[in-house]
Every structure is written in structure tokens, then in C-alpha cells.
Image (tube, coloured by chain):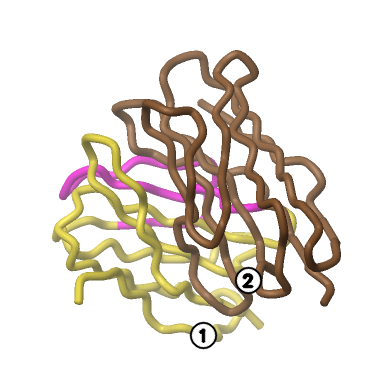
Chain colours: A brown, B yellow
Amino acid sequence: AQSVSQHNHHVILSEAASLELGCNYSYGGTVNLFWYVQYPGQHLQLLLKYFSGDPLVKGIKGFEAEFIKSKFSFNLRKPSVQWSDTAEYFCAVTPYGNNRLAFGKGNQVVVIP
Amino acid sequence: DGGITQSPKYLFRKEGQNVTLSCEQNLNHDAMYWYRQDPGQGLRLIYYSQIVNDFQKGDIAEGYSVSREKKESFPLTVTSAQKNPTAFYLCACNSAIGNTEAFFGQGTRLTVV
């Protein structure tokens, strides 16, 4: 079964700082990749996704992620965070043709005003 | 509005009792999933179903049971055999084929006392 690794479970940064969250997966075939976000007290919602094409994908709220196939990575970035970006972020992977999602353990991000 | 609904939002049960969590979707999705979310552990897959009358164990199925008698519904029973049932439970659905994202319910927080 595929697995997903997210490092630095707790991230604390100040407003306007840049954010990068790492995601690595273990699966040798073609994959679909996702980042989900869970704001405090809210349900999971999709931040961005990669199926094919341009490896740099743009999501909502100024987030972007880059798929690097050779590194089995799909890192999430935002150049300048806001207090409202305080949330838990989850990377998820499905093998192509199989929509069973595997999640990483999440990154708890706290942005200090 | 199309969506996925979990009920109840909060649930309290005495130790030793079975309890059933509801999940209903009107997105016409074939696949449905149950995840358990614990702090620092991310989302772990309990059971999933790709089609009516069929379901598969996930990574932590022990102490849980499910049924899939209708496409729209995928209830989860937390049995007395589950050693640590207090958790946040999330239901999700997506299309069983093709490249699609998963949609999540609001979750049920189960507390066993």
C-alpha cells in the first residue's frame, strides 16, 4: 500500500513569512496528489490537486504545490501567510485508477499575527 | 445542494455499547470511506466501499463494522471490541473511477465514557 510522509508536524510562523510543507509518497506508479486543509472547527476541504500536466499547480488562497516525480514529492508553498492560514494541512495520494486516498499525518500550522 | 452529511455531530456512549454513525451522500458517488482522525496521527482509513453491497477493510478495521446496502448510505458501527473508540470520525466519498477529489462530511466526535 502507498504511504505518505509529512514532516515537521507543528509549524509556527509570523504573518508575511513564507510557508513550505513537505510531502513525500511511496508508490512507484502514476499517482494523483492532493492537499487538503482543515481550518479550526471546519471540515476538510480541497486546497489543490494534481492529476497530470504542468507539475506546478495553483490552488485556492494563494497556495501552490510542485510535483517532482523523481523525488516522489508534492510540496506545498505559500509566499506570504496570513493569520487566517492557521489550520491543519494534509497531503493525500491515490494511485491512478484507484481512488482510495492515503493521507499523511498532517501539518499543524499556526500563524502569529 | 449536493453534499455529504454525517450525523450526529457529537455522540456520547457508555463503554461496552455499540454505536452507529451515519453517513449519507447525494453526490451520486460510487465510493465511500470512513476515516478516523486522532491528533498527530492524521487520517487513518477504517473501511471503504467502491460499490453497493461490497466493502473492504482499511488500515484500522478492527473493532468496526460497516454496511453498504444503498449507494447513498455507508453507516459505521463502532463495536465494543474497539479498544480506543473515542475519536473524530470522518466520512468521505468520491467517484470510483477517473480522477476525482474526495468530499468530506463535517465529522462525528465520539466520546466513550
**Which residue corresponds to mark 2?**
B86
CB under 8 Å between discs 1 and 2: no
Which residue: 46% across, 62% down? A45
In the rendering, at what x and y percent does residue B86 appear? 63, 71
Residue holding disc 1: B10
Q: Where is residue B92 in the image (x, y as percent from the top left)?
A: 37, 58
Q: Residues within 10 Å of mark 1 (few under 14, many from 20)?
A: few
Q: Is residue A106 left or right of residue A65?
A: right
Q: Which residue is drawn at 53% across and 20% down?
A: A27
Above-or-below relation of A58 to A71: below
Choose between A47 and B109: the one closer to the eye: A47
Front residue of this view, candidates A2 and A63: A63
The kind of residue on which mark 1 rests is: Tyr
Amino acid on which disc 2 is placed: Thr
Q: Residue B46: where, in percent of width, then height?
A: 47, 50
Q: Is residue B84 above or below residue A42?
A: above
Badge 2 element? loop
Q: Mark number for residue B109?
A: none
Where B92 falls versus A5 (above or below)? below
Q: In which quarter of the image is the C terminus of chain B?
A: bottom right
Give the mark nearer the N terminus: 1 vs 2: 1
Q: What element carries label 1?
A: strand
| Residue B47 magenta | yes
Front residue of this view, candidates A32 and B62: A32
Who's the residue at 66% across and 67% down the image? Answer: A85
C-alpha distance separating marks 1 and 2 = 11 Å
Chain letter belonging to callout 2: B
Tell me what residue is drawn at x 32 percent, y 69 percent. B23
Residue B100: percent from the left, percent from the top?
A: 30, 43
Where residue B26 sits, quadrant-wise, is: bottom left
Query: Which region shows up in magenta?
Result: B42-66
